[in-house]
Amino acid sequence: MWQKDNNLKDLDSVNSNISADILIIGAGITGVTTAYNLINSGLNVILIDRGKCFNEVTAKSTGKITYLQDLKYQDICNIYNYETAKLYYDTQKEAIKIIKKNIKDNEINCDFEKSESVTFTTDEKKIPKFIAEENLLKSFGVKYSNNCDLIDDNKIKHLISVKNTYVFNPVKYLKGLLKVVKSANNIKVYENSIATKVRKDAKSYTVMVNNFEVKAKKIVVACNYPFFTIPGFIPLKTYLKRSYITATKVDDHEKINGITGTSPVISFRFYEEKNNKYFIYLSNTSKISNKLNHEKNNEETIIESKKITGKFPSYKWMNMDVMTNDFLPIIGKVSDEDSNVFIATGYNAWGMTNGTIAGKIIFDLIRKKQNKYTNLFSPSRVLNAKKIKNFAINTLGSNAKAYLLNIIKKNPSWYKDKVIVTKENKKRIGIYFDKDGRSHKVLNVCPHLKCFLNFNMVDKTWDCPCHGSRFNIDGKAVKGPSQYDIKIDETK
């Protein structure tokens, strides 16, 4: 839905060896916010994106700016303690202030408006969890209510409502920020520029981008999911979830957004631009190793949204979110050994606020300035027994399931006669037959960490069920972490 507003003039791609003080990889909300913060830093900055700026995860967000995030504070408190949960709440409130200030200072027209946030359940057995969350919110000083004038549904057994939250059009917002970034003398922005390898030199780093060398003293990896495994070991600290989203034209515009506090996840909001009003609905959330029949999942979400609106949606899409095993984002120095490489990922489906605070934290780290949230989100924060348990269930369990399923059932029933996974010359091959009967043959192994791929019948892509890489029918990598294609070299 938001991608229709991404009508910026195409930018240059990296086509020569270049250098800067700071290289930011990824022009979504984290990368653009970080670049914006660096405008008056006196440092030369290069911002790159593998495709079009903010056209991936940010453009697939629902665009909520809220600190009421299902039962997040309870989750964090159960893993760590009350102080940690309160500090995370503080980050979300600060992020909201930053977004509001950026919009005001730069007069950005991004359909920003106040929206009442609710989290709710239809299961009476879940009410004690909501009461526990209310107790935490009360201790934080949050004024909440258990009533909402905009919701009249007797299926809802309990809800929590707060009023000082917001929604916006994320692409229009970043387009406004990027306009300011591009006008800065110290920042260069490039699109269609894929980073593949990082080499540590004596006093800097060399990153291969489009097969050219980009030298930088510091690197910010802001590409949703890092394209490298070491350092950081992000695949061991995270897992991914997929959701299906629709946007349907409606007659009324309600200033409310909501999400279920427990599974199954249902999320909604309203959006108004000019004379058009939309109801945005998200459901069918699962780990990306589960529910691999995308046509069925997509259709189920459409049916659910039609029951609410009575209409067929104008837009439909899916998104993937990087989740952490301790419910906290990963933001900061990737490791003590690589203290000039910064990373931001694992936003747990709340990217608008967490991407914004990440831009502030990394900006402060670059300037060697104290930030009270540095330790909270540190990529090297210590393990505990509960995090290890979640790792076994979410990360290890999901990847093992995906790998085994692709061995046992490499040609599921929904492939029908359109897709075949087979072996040729001892290589695992995937073949898609288009509507004209032409075959499109690719390697069926993800270059990132060698997981087998599943075919997405909705988007016509080969998707990795372990870490979310995606490839088109001819094998070109269209989403990371893989930076390499799965095209077959017919000459070998």
Image (tube, rainbow, N blue to C red):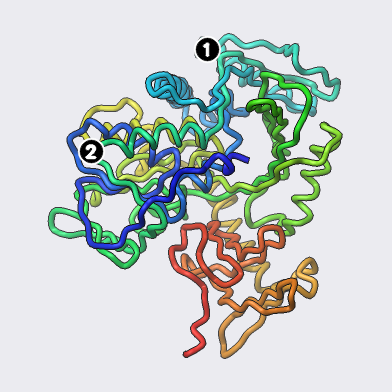
* Residue at which label 1 appears: 139
Left or right of residue 369: residue 490:
right
Task: Mark yes or no: residue 83 visible.
Answer: no
Judge whether 38 appears above or below 439 on screen. above
Coordinates of residue 131 in the picture (x, y in percent): 67, 18
Q: As rendered, which of 234 and 244 lies closer to the eye?
A: 244
Coordinates of residue 132 in the picture (x, y in percent): 63, 20
- Dot 1, crowdedness within 10 Å: few (<14), some or many (≥20)? few
Coordinates of residue 129 in the picture (x, y in percent): 67, 25
* Residue at which label 2 appears: 185
User: For the residues marked 2 and 1, what is the alpha-carbon distance in whole angstroms?
Assistant: 46 Å
Q: As rendered, which of 191 and 483 lies closer to the eye?
A: 191
- Please, what is the three-letter code of the amino acid marked with disc 2? Asn
Location of residue 441 (image quadrant): bottom right
Q: Are the residues tagged 2 and 1 within 8 Å (C-beta)?
A: no
Tag count in the figure? 2
SS category of the residue bearing label 1: helix
Judge whether 298 appears above or below 95 on screen. below
Kindly identify which numbered label has been placed on residue 184: none
Left or right of residue 401: residue 448:
left
Judge whether 211 appears above or below 248 on screen. below
Residue drawn at x 17%, y 35% is 42
Residue drawn at x 69%, y 26% is 275
- Please, what is the three-letter code of the amino acid marked with disc 1? Ser
Q: As rendered, which of 154 and 128 lies closer to the eye?
A: 154
Residue drawn at x 27%, y 31% is 364
Left or right of residue 454: residue 476:
left
- Dot 2, crowdedness within 10 Å: few (<14), some or many (≥20)? few
